[in-house]
Amino acid sequence: MVAVGSLTLTDSTAYNPKVLPLPRDEDRRTREWERVRAAQNGDLVAFEELYRDNVGRVHSVCFRMAGDAALAEELTQDVFVRAWQKLSSFRGDSAFSTWLHPLTINVALSERRSGRRRLARVMHTDDLTPFERPGRPAGPEAALDLERALNILPDGAMAVFVLHDVEGYKHEEIGELIGVATGTSKAQLHRARRLLREALQS
Amino acid sequence: MTCGEVQELIDDYVDGALTGPELHEVELHIASCAACREEERQLRALIARASALPREKAPPRDLWPGIAARLGEHGDARARWSGTRRVLFSRPMGLAAAAAVALALLSVLVGRPTGQATPPSPTGSIETVSTKGTPAPVLAAETDYVRATGQLMDALSARRSGLSPETVKAVDDNLKTIDDALRQIRVALDKDPGNRQLTKMLASTHQKKLDLLLRLLKLTSQI
């Protein structure tokens, strides 16, 4: 007898859909949903597992939108605290990561709007020397330059650029997510791209 | 179509959102205008760079202890049994409560009665607990903690061979750092036994050590 996740296979099993393992993705979703249900009932260990599965994605968005490593860590923690508090509203209609993503965006945007911790970011982004050196690097250094260049963007333009060009959202989805008209989202994207090209060429 | 008109549509053009006559006119203009062609090239290059950015970027340090602490502070974490798993935090997370949780957890994970003391492993664990001036409840709780971590270290010592040398070294380094911190806090507590902040630090540092050992135990269970 072999245990596979929560299922059990016996030596005599030839083909029985009730005991054969689920496809990998579905199995993962099932495990994730079990963790969510446990976390909804107060199980912090299950929530830690959800954190470990999703922290890389959440942190990458926070880092890009915050433009500051320390602030990104703080925002990432804020996201998971908020997620825990709102977890009862998650019904499992989508992957947990799909539910978590708008929450992450909103936490990061709220931070930018509040200006609560803006001083650190302003001090960080005042250093524009990386954009002043001649010749643009390729590969990972180019990616680093782009990430740093995001800091020069105004809040709205930065948010739309990250959502559209990095995360792959459509303008209509961005409009719903951050509460702006589709036309505004397009205008912000145009502005962001122009400013970024100027910064990266300088 | 003029360059200005193309500029207004060029984002939709590179995003593939233009259709019909507008698409045709923009294509015609770009084919005959070097400046707009260069604009298009730069835009596509920028978009390619943006879409190539990694979707995941792990934080440089583990943020979970801070999150768990905040959930505990806010009273959001409700300690409870869940099958064979145990929630690690409850509110308030005092030293005695944390030590009790640690011992209960041990009885599940290691399968030893919590009342039986086991000599701690010589590596990475606190072997003695200072009694000088330490309030009795703190001393009792810390003794439980030391016993708990010692038992975990024993359980893990047999499984270390399944871990990579890098992992073993990282764990040993972390344990040493935690133990150094525990010693410093204890020295400070000896001088100021009633200091609640120090007691709290002692609890959280013990909890960090316990979390590390439990994580490692989980890891070795999966190998």
Image (tube, rainbow, N blue to C red):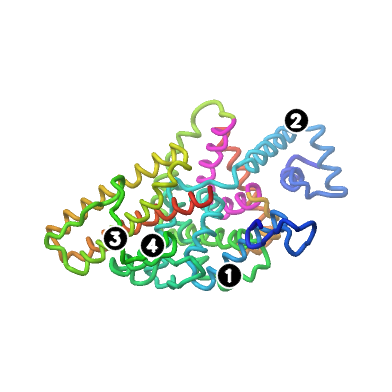
The relative height of residue B47 versus residue A48 in the rendered view (above or below) is above
Visible in this render: residue A65? Answer: no
Report how far apart the C-alphas of labels 2 and 1 lie in the structure.
58 Å
Q: Is residue B172 visible?
A: yes
Q: CA distance from mark 3 to mark 2?
A: 81 Å
Residue neighbourhood size for the residue with mark 3, other residues' Cα within 10 Å, grouped as few (<14), some (14–19), many (≥20): some
Task: Say what amino acid the circle numbered 4 marks.
Answer: Arg
Do the numbered discs 3 and 2 sit on residues whose CB atoms are within 8 Å? no
Query: Range of the magenta residues?
Result: A139-166
Q: Amino acid at mark 1?
A: Arg
Distance between mark 4 and mark 1 Cα atoms: 30 Å
- Mark 4 vs mark 2: in front: 4
Q: Give the residue number, with chain letter if any, for mark 2.
A: B34
Residue B190 occupies which quadrant of the picture? bottom left
Element under disc 1: helix
Label 3 or label 2, whichever lies nearer to me, is 3
Mark 3 and mark 4: span between their CA atoms?
A: 9 Å
Residue named by callout 3? B117
Identify the secondary structure beneath mark 4: loop
Q: Chain of mark 4?
A: B
The chain holding disc 2 is B
